[in-house]
């Protein structure tokens, strides 16, 4: 039986997650519309507004959480393959910024992730934090960057003091994640060739 090394399995898991999540996102709105039609006028708003808003918010949060988890896994794999003394947890910061510091500056991993992709990832992290922690107002530190990002990408909307996410948000997040995970997986895969 052929065993796929951890770094190779990681690469294929990254690719499979991005592809499966994108396919899923394309089908959810269609399903919710069918449910709204089946349940009639009384529950139409529930299926066309409330449930989709909750669903797309949860999906956006999950996609970013998965991206963070993949970076953490990459740090562990790189530490083992390169026999490094320090682990990811010893570095300052949190999440992807800490992983980036570990992988690029400490482990000297060659990641072909563009500056723009890193910036999109950081803004996706701000979006995730605002969705999870709430308290989004004009005085919030993420208000200005997220408002500008929403206007630039049309992936979500900032309305007053609310963030409105839709399937477009998930598709946008998946595009970022697919690109970043492809490069991350490739770098980890190449590491032990």
Image: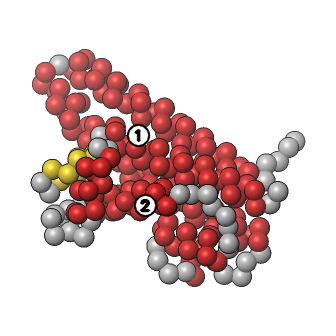
Report the number of discs: 2
Relative to 58, 36 lies left or right? left
Viewer can see residue 117 = yes
> Looking at this view, is 181 or 35 the one in front?
181
Viewer can see residue 131 = no
Q: What element carries label 2?
A: helix
Residue plotted at (16% across, 31% down):
45
Taking the view exactly as shown, the residue that stands out farthest to the right is: 1
The nearer-to-camera label among 2 and 1 is: 2
Q: Where is residue 75 in the image (x, y as percent from the top left)?
A: 63, 67
Residue plotted at (22% across, 63% down):
143
Would you place residue 164 above or below residue 41 in this image?
below
Image quadrant where residue 38 sits: top left
Image quadrant where residue 27 sits: top left
Would you place residue 30 above or below residue 88 in this image?
above
Relative to 57, 19 lies left or right? right
Would you place residue 76 above or below residue 24 in this image?
below
* Residue under label 1: 171
* Residue under label 2: 119
Q: Position of residue 152 (x, y in %)?
A: 30, 49
> Looking at this view, is 120 or 1 the one in front?
120
Dividing the image into 4 quarters, which one contains the C terminus?
Answer: bottom right
Characterize the local packing of mark 2: few (<14), some (14-19) or many (20 or more) Cα atoms within 10 angstroms: few
Q: Earlier in the sequence, mark 2 or mark 1?
A: 2
Residue plotted at (73% across, 77% down):
84
């Amino acid at each position: 039986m052929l065993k796929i090394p951890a770094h190779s399995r990681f690469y294929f898991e990254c690719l499979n997650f991005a592809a499966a999540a994108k396919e899923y996102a394309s089908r959810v709105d269609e399903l919710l519309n069918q449910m709204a039609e089946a349940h009639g006028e009384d529950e139409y708003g529930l299926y066309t507004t409330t449930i989709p808003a909750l669903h797309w918010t949860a999906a956006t949060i999950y996609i970013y959480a998965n991206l963070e988890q993949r970076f953490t896994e990459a740090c562990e794999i790189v530490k083992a393959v390169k026999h490094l003394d320090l682990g990811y947890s010893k570095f300052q910061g949190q999440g992807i910024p800490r992983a980036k510091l570990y992988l690029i500056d400490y482990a000297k991993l060659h990641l072909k992730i563009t500056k723009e992709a890193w910036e999109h990832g950081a803004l996706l992290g701000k979006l995730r934090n605002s969705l999870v922690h709430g308290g989004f107002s004009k005085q919030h530190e993420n208000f200005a960057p997220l408002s500008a990002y929403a206007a630039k990408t049309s992936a979500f909307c900032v309305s007053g003091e609310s963030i409105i996410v839709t399937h477009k948000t998930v598709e946008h997040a998946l595009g970022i994640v697919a690109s970043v995970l492809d490069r991350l997986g490739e770098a980890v895969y190449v590491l032990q060739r």
